[in-house]
Amino acid sequence: MSEKPSLLIIGNSNVGKSSITRLLMPNPRYYKGKSGKKPGSTLLIRPISHSNMDYQIVDLPGFGYMKHSSHRRQEHLKKQIVIHIEKHYQDYFFGLVVINILRIEDEIEKYFIQNKKTIPLSFELIGFLKEFKINLLILINKIDKVSIFDKNRFIKLFLDSANEYNLKLVKYADFDASRELEIPYLEFSALKRINLKKLKQIIQEYLNQV
């Protein structure tokens, strides 16, 4: 990987990673990313850089929830991601774990409430990244797609369920880095650019610590 510090963007398929990547670029409208392709189409792991950016972005392949993908292919992608993180985790000054708010209820119902022997992919991913001590921000995307009532309900369900896996998620505004067990989250909308300015500020704060 290049000498520039790396920002990790990771999450399950079709959560909006490529759209977020595009918004972080100096000229979003000219960034020809993978947005709009079918879920799971991002296969190559390669840094995205720009001369006017002080860091590079690594938008990792999405996995899970691929309607037209075999279980074997999903497991292959998952293995690729694990190997990549194990090899490059020290390159990342910060990581964004993107969550699709529209999927929270179904994921927790299927992998936690109905089957106690499984773990929701989102929580598995967050726990895995925390093992490598990567600074993380959970980006709860697509909040513009739900009512305020449902948004609050889904987020509460997400936080309460995460707590069952010893993942203490808190609003970024309430986050205290000295409390090592806390993981901040930010409500977000790539489409409406809700909290985009705040996201850029957060990224810059962590970049300044490098």
Image (spheres, helix red, strand yellow):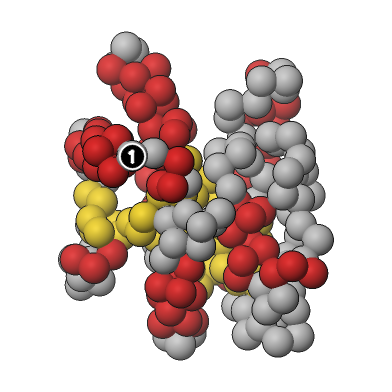
Residue 105 pos. (x, y %): 35, 27
**Residue at 25% of width from left, 38% of height from top?**
149
Does residue 122 appear left or right of residue 5 in this picture? left
Question: What amino acid is at disc 1?
Answer: Ser
Does residue 73 appear left or right of residue 163 in this picture? right
**Residue at 66% of width from left, 54% of height from top?**
18
Residue 127 pos. (x, y %): 38, 45
Q: Residues within 10 Å of mark 1 (few under 14, many from 20)?
A: few
| Mark 1, secondary structure of its residue | loop
Task: Report which residue position mark 1 lands on.
Answer: 147
Residue 133 sits above or below residue 141 on the image = below
Residue 120 sits above or below residue 197 on the image = above
Residue 204 visible in the snapshot: yes
Residue 148 sits above or below residue 38 on the image = below
Q: Nearer the viewer, residue 127 or 152?
A: 152
**Residue at 76% of width from left, 50% of height from top?**
34
Q: Nearer the viewer, residue 90 or 28?
A: 28
Does residue 199 appear left or right of residue 154 in this picture? right
**Residue at 45% of width from left, 41% of height from top?**
145
The quadrant in which residue 108 appears is top left
Residue 2 visible in the snapshot: no
Q: How many marks can you see?
A: 1
The quadrant in which residue 85 appears is bottom right
Residue 59 pos. (x, y %): 65, 56
Does residue 73 appear left or right of residue 14 in this picture? right
